[in-house]
Image (cartoon, grey):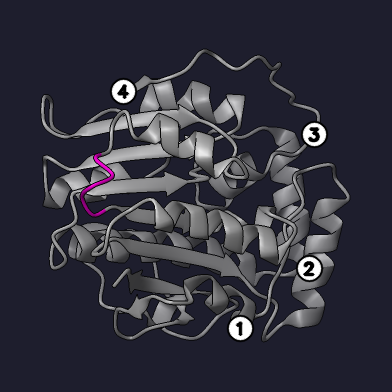
Amino acid sequence: MTTHDEDPAGELDTTTPHSARIWNYWLGGKDNFEVDRRAGDDYAVVFPQIITIARESRAFLGRAVTYLAGEAGVRQFLDVGTGLPIADNTHEVAQRVAPGARVVYVDNDPLVLAHARALLVPVVDGAGTTEYVHEDMRNPEQLLAKASKVLDLTQPVAVMFMGSLGHVQSLEEARRVVGVLLDAVPAGSYLVAEDGSAAQSAETFQEAQDGYDETGAAPYVLRTPAEIESLFDGLEWVPPGFTSLPLWRPAPDPDLARIGTSAEPIDVYGGVARKP
């Protein structure tokens, strides 16, 4: 795996919790520190469902990418705000179905860049492309300029935001980011997006999130399901449409069944939709 820009400057801070490392911890990964584990445990004490949400989000990624690379025939994926690699990353799922698939990961975190270079490698030697772009999603024009060195933007692309748009504080800004990226890809492209929402457990989820935000980690906005659904305006839903993630095509591929699913609605919503 290669990158298309210089190494970003930045020291590794092990004194402040880091959202990507906390998520890695909740998923059972090892790329985290004691400060992250404490923050993750504190969050889970207040809102235990967060562990299920993390696992359901990863399982949804697997099902969505399997569908897109298989039934939909998509061969290009732009995964924005990817976080730290762990089991069943986008490139692994896509290239398992379609070995020639091209996958570009985008993140603005030097820690993620370091891990991406070490861990994100093509599943099949010489087949497909798996690359990393260091860029902030709030700069979608620059992001596209870098991603276009790998992806052919005249051909369909699956644009993915897997729990990352909650880090954009304004809904209007989140919609702008999505809009710029979708405007740059042709008809037949797809949006895959999901985010946490304090719809069913508003008090405890928000309490846990408030405590998390106070640790110094990057804040995360819990939007309503309607706000998350608005990110898909103008697109055509892939059945079953917008829903709590465990209800989106809930029979996973056997290769993806390592991460358990609840089969019950929980406070994380999203879907897959096609650009007409």
Whole-percent x, y for residue 43 in the image: 75, 59
Marks 1 and 2, the one that precedes in the sequence: 2
| Dot 2 alpha-carbon crowd within 10 angstroms: few under 14, some 14 to 19, many 20 or more | some
- Indicate left or right for 159 with 38 as reference: left
Question: Which of the 4 image quarters holds residue 171?
Answer: bottom right
Q: Position of residue 231 (x, y in %)?
A: 53, 70
User: How far separated are the C-alphas under marks 4 and 1?
Assistant: 38 Å
Q: For the residue marked with disc 1, what is the amino acid?
A: Ala
Lower sequence index among marks 4 and 1: 4
Main secondary structure type of the part rendered in magenta: loop
The mark nearer the N terminus, 3 or 2, is 3
Badge 2 marks a residue whose secondary structure is: helix
**Rendered image: mark on residue 226:** 1
- In space, the residues marked 3 and 2 are separated at their CA atoms by 20 Å
Q: CA distance from mark 3 to mark 4?
A: 29 Å
Q: Residues within 10 Å of mark 3 (few under 14, many from 20)?
A: some
Q: Is residue 235 left or right of residue 201?
A: left
Give whichever of 263, 106 is nearer the camera: 106
Q: CA distance from mark 1 to mark 3?
A: 33 Å
Is there CB contact under 8 Å for labels 2 and 4?
no
The span from disc 1 to disc 2 (Cα, nearest Å) is 25 Å
Q: Amino acid at mark 2?
A: Val
Q: Nearer the viewer, residue 237 or 213?
A: 237
Q: Which residue is mark 2?
A: 46
- For the record, the magenta segment spans 152-156
Q: Which mark is residue 1?
A: 4
Q: Secondary structure at mark 1?
A: helix
- Which mark, by number, is residue 33? none
Quadrant where the image shows the C terminus: bottom left
